Amino acid sequence: MGSVIVGTGMSVPDRVVGNDDLAAVMDTSDRWIATRSGVRERRVAEPGVGASHLGAAAAAAALADAGLDAGAVDLLVTATMTPDFLAPGMAPLIQDRLGLGRVPSFDLRAQCSGFLYALDLADGYLQAERAGTALVVGAEVHSGFMPWSAQLASGAAPDPAGWDRNTRHRGWGVLFGDGAGAMVVKAGRDPAVGYLGGRLWTDGSLFELIHVPGVGFRHQPYVDQAQLEGEDHLPVMQGRELYRQAVRLMPEAVRQVLAEHGLGLEDLDVVVAHQANDRITEGVRRALGVDADVVPSNIGRYGNTTAATLPILYHELRSAGRVPPGGLVCFTAFGAGAHWGAALYREPGDRT
Ligand code: ACO
């Protein structure tokens, strides 16, 4: 019986950082960022605001949308690569803040594919009748990674060393933003409606495409001055190879999951694709032979919010009436790990 999404919500910080703001603290330009990535602005959390705060706000909005109280939830699955603390994860913080009661609550680490994995796992719990109502949350505060965040917050112009550091990391430092999205998912009764099924893949041999080399427990001590001075606490990205893999593997995943359900591209109403980069989204459109109506994008306003892109984009499309009753939605993502996959979802309601 396909699990049904009965509520959605999102939360982003109020603070907007445009490309010109970044051009004031590093050698970059609105033109470079917009043409290479599609990002025009991103939201940035104030210091002290963590992914759990945004995640809890998105989850509360999703519960309100579903018309449910916190007491109705019996499973919380969250996805983030930027938890408030190294330990514990984000889920217990959200569980406590929302007053969910002592329901099983845990983080899942699959970066840009985190929400896809979390939704698939929640569906498994619901199918197995180990839960009746699941809350699935993707939330990120990437600002802590950004070499430029403290500088922008202070309002002061960077010194030459700060300018050089920001510029050294400009390849990835302009792409990301903060935000959260959530869904309330309930066990369904009709196998033809709701979550029809997902396919998930991992290829760990690709882990170096984007990873954070330092501040991990293979180091003793796990963090030290040498790692910080070597900037090993910041992401390292092989942008071109990431692009090549993403534009190949997401369309392959979409085609495969469709084929496994006896469906074709012509049956799709909307593809909710991970928002890593508009060039990647455009590559997915090209590979599938569809346009931006079918594979929409909102990266211009938020940047890449990693585990939050799928629920934020789906929430916006659903709120704008862009997912028709009875329509077929395909969620797809590719990201660090490498993890990727696709899942099909049939909207409840008759097509009229
Ligand atoms: N502003 C100005 N110039 C820049 C910037 C910037 N922000 N970043 C890099 N450049 C410069 C480089 O220094 C380089 O200069 P050089 O030729 O003088 O050496 C030049 O631009 C080209 O750099 P490349 O890294 O080769 O640029 P490329 O054309 O590959 O574009 C990009 C970089 C946009 C990251 C591209 O590789 C891409 O789209 N990759 C996909 C990766 C991605 O989107 N990752 C998101 C996170 S991962 C995920 O979510 C799956």
Image (cartoon, rainbow, N blue to C red):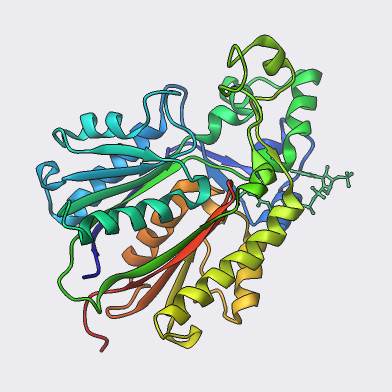
In the picture, the quarter occupied by the C terminus is bottom left
204 to 167, vertically: above or below: below
156 to 23, vertically: above or below: above
Q: Position of residue 309 (x, y in %)?
A: 47, 53
In the picture, the quarter occupied by the N terminus is bottom left
From where the camera sits, is residue 312 visible? Answer: no
Q: Position of residue 89 (x, y in %)?
A: 37, 30
On screen, residue 49 versus residue 20, left or right, reads left
50 to 136, vertically: above or below: above
On screen, residue 87 versus residue 274, left or right, reads left
Q: Position of residue 111 (x, y in %)?
A: 51, 45
On screen, residue 244 versus residue 192, left or right, reads right
Report the residue at 25% width, 76% height from top: 193
On screen, residue 346 versus residue 38, left or right, reads left
From where the camera sits, is residue 314 visible? Answer: yes
Report the residue at 33% width, 53% height from top: 121
Q: How many marks?
A: 0
Q: Position of residue 158 (x, y in %)?
A: 72, 21
